[in-house]
């Protein structure tokens, strides 16, 4: 009987740390791994270890990447005078899937959130300002989530970026109210980027 | 609006309830602790996903159970509407006409009910928070814009208060959150003002109809008296130094008041028990009228134990004050099922030990 076996508990707890996984799903995943062929479980462990080792943050845009700079930053065909700021890598992926955007990105790795102890220093804000000083950026589009925290972050960045004499706008339409960017569909996001407003 | 059937399983002490109320006045009678209030509570929970007596939803499941189901059939603007709520160990699932709904906001406002219970006298007698909750509950059902502004406002307020707890708060960061407080706060204030203005006249009329004499007055006292974000922001900025000193946001709609007066005196301090109850009831009847004006039909009115709380004269006048065409579900403990004081045509039900029967 696996119930209460320490190794099983550890595995279940590890799965429960993952987003969207509750106790029951965690137990199902753990049981699957324990009953699957040994190679399958080893391959999963290996994939996780490899990915963690190879994937780092891009020294330019702070997005996750395998190889530095990332594919977007290294692509000469993209318009690097335009930067789209997102909270998380998932936001950049969502916009990229929309295929309408040809500029570069900047990933903040969060949003201002005093309740969780996250201020400007916990985000890649300094890094973004450094980019504005050293790259020829003409416009920044702020695509933080349409939550209270995302809006506050947009305001904060808007002021700093304007002070640097760079044009700044905020995606406005179509982003789901109170929702995360990664849940928006492609058409909605294209529309949101088109309808951006100046801050 | 009319409920044609209410059914539930595993809800409080109700045993497989199936309740088919009639179109006009329905009287549910029974001794104490037989389940009268629970029937009303089930209907309230079905259409608002909230109970009036607890925020601990686990208490709603029958003792020893971890799940309950409530379903209802309604007639809205002459068309049938089916609502279901399934509660399993803290998880809620909603269905409207058989289709699963993702969020509470998808079910709010589908069926409007007005609920009155003896504890509602706190609306008049209690602290400001009770009246703000009343405003929020009513407006959230009437306006999606209000609900969104309120949710955002509360979250932003929590964030700003957290910053204010720091030994030396960063003013430029405070200013960032104030922008949003102003935007959402102005919407909340404007909507509350409009709601209160309309409610005022209706509540005066209702009070007059029940009490026949005293003069009832209500006034919305906005803490920041501005309906535009710019003016709202100015007030917040002017108060920032004080907020920093106090370590909390001291101004905004979270400090709004609704002042009631009876015969020119503040009802909270000077009203008699009976006057306060009548005022609270008048507010609910005003809400009933307001919802009809906005939505085109009366909501379902639920009156829990009102008769035991009003004197005979006022009870009779209450019966006369119920508008024609409103569906009303009323509970009563007296054996006459309230008939003695409610000389109106009605459908009677008795409830005993959680079992309801048509009389
Ligand atoms: N979760 C529950 N499960 C079973 N019984 C409950 C539950 N919660 C309350 N009760 C009981 O239900 C009975 C009826 O309550 P209530 O509806 O308030 O009665 P009434 O309004 O007729 O006085 C009370 O005896 C109370 O103890
Ligand atoms: Mg009761
Ligand atoms: Zn990059």
Image: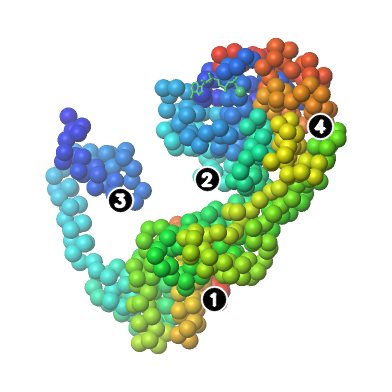
The residue that disc 4 covers is B210
Against B29, residue B198 (above or below) is below
Q: CA distance from mark 1 to mark 4?
A: 55 Å
A148 displayed left or right of A86: right
Among numbered discs 3 and 1, the one appearing first in the sequence: 3
Which of disc 2 and disc 4 is earlier in sequence?
Answer: 2
Residue B167 visible here: yes
Same chain for labels 1 and 4? Say yes or no: no
Per the image, the residue denoted by label 3 is A18
Q: Is residue A20 above or below residue B57?
A: below
Distance from disc 2 to disc 3, alpha carbons, whole Å, reads 23 Å
Q: CA distance from mark 3 to mark 1?
A: 36 Å
Label 1, residues with CA under 10 Å away: few <14, some 14-19, many ≥20: some
Q: Which mark is residue A199?
A: 1
Percent x, y of residue A16: 29, 46
| Residue B116 or residue A196, whichever sits in front | B116
């Amino acid at each position: 009987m696996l119930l209460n076996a320490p190794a099983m508990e550890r595995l279940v707890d590890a799965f429960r740390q993952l987003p969207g996984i509750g106790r029951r799903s965690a137990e199902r995943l753990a049981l699957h791994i324990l009953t699957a062929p040994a190679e399958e479980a080893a391959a999963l462990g290996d994939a996780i270890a490899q990915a963690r080792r190879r994937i780092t943050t891009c020294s330019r845009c702070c997005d996750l990447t395998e190889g530095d700079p990332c594919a977007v930053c290294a692509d000469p065909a993209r318009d690097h005078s335009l930067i789209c700021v997102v909270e998380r890598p998932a936001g950049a992926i969502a916009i990229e899937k929309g295929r309408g955007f040809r500029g570069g990105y900047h990933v903040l790795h969060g949003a201002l959130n005093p309740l969780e102890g996250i201020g400007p220093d916990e985000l890649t804000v300094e890094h973004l300002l450094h980019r504005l000083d050293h790259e020829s950026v003409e416009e920044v589009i702020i695509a933080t989530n349409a939550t209270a925290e995302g809006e506050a972050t947009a305001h904060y960045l808007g002021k700093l970026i304007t002070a640097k004499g760079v044009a700044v706008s905020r995606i406005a339409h179509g982003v789901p109210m109170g929702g995360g960017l990664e849940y928006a569909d492609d058409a909605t996001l294209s529309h949101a980027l088109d309808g951006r407003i100046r801050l | 609006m009319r409920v044609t059937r209410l059914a539930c399983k595993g809800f409080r002490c109700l045993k497989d309830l199936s309740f088919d109320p009639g179109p006009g006045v329905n009287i549910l009678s029974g001794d104490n602790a037989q389940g009268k209030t629970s029937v009303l509570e089930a209907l309230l929970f079905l259409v608002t996903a909230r109970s009036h007596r607890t925020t601990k939803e686990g208490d709603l499941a029958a003792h020893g159970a971890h799940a309950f189901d409530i379903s209802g059939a309604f007639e809205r603007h002459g068309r049938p509407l089916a609502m279901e709520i399934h509660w399993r160990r803290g998880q809620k699932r909603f269905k409207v006409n058989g289709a699963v709904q993702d969020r509470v906001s998808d079910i709010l406002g589908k069926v409007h009910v007005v609920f009155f219970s003896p504890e509602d006298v706190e609306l008049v007698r209690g602290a400001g928070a009770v009246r703000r909750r009343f405003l929020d509950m009513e407006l959230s059902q009437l306006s999606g814009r209000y609900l969104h502004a309120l949710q955002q406002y509360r979250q932003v307020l929590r964030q700003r208060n957290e910053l204010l707890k720091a030994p030396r708060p960063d003013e430029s960061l405070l200013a960032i959150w104030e922008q949003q407080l102003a935007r959402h706060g102005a919407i909340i204030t404007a909507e509350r003002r409009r709601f209160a203005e309309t409610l005022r006249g209706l509540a005066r009329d209702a009070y007059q109809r029940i009490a026949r004499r005293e003069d009832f007055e209500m006034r919305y006292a906005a803490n920041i008296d501005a309906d535009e974000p710019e003016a709202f922001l100015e007030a917040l900025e002017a108060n920032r130094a004080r907020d920093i000193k106090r370590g909390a946001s001291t101004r905004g709609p979270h400090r709004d008041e609704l002042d009631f007066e009876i015969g020119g005196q503040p009802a909270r301090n000077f009203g008699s028990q009976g006057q306060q109850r009548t005022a609270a009831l008048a507010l609910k009847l005003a809400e009933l009228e307001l919802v009809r004006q906005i939505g085109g039909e009366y909501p379902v009115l639920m009156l829990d134990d009102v008769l035991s709380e009003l004197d005979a004269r006022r009870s009779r006048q209450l019966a006369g004050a119920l508008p024609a065409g409103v569906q009303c579900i009323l509970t009563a403990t007296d054996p006459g099922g309230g008939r003695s004081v409610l000389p109106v045509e009605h459908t009677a039900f008795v409830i005993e030990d959680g079992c309801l029967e048509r009389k």
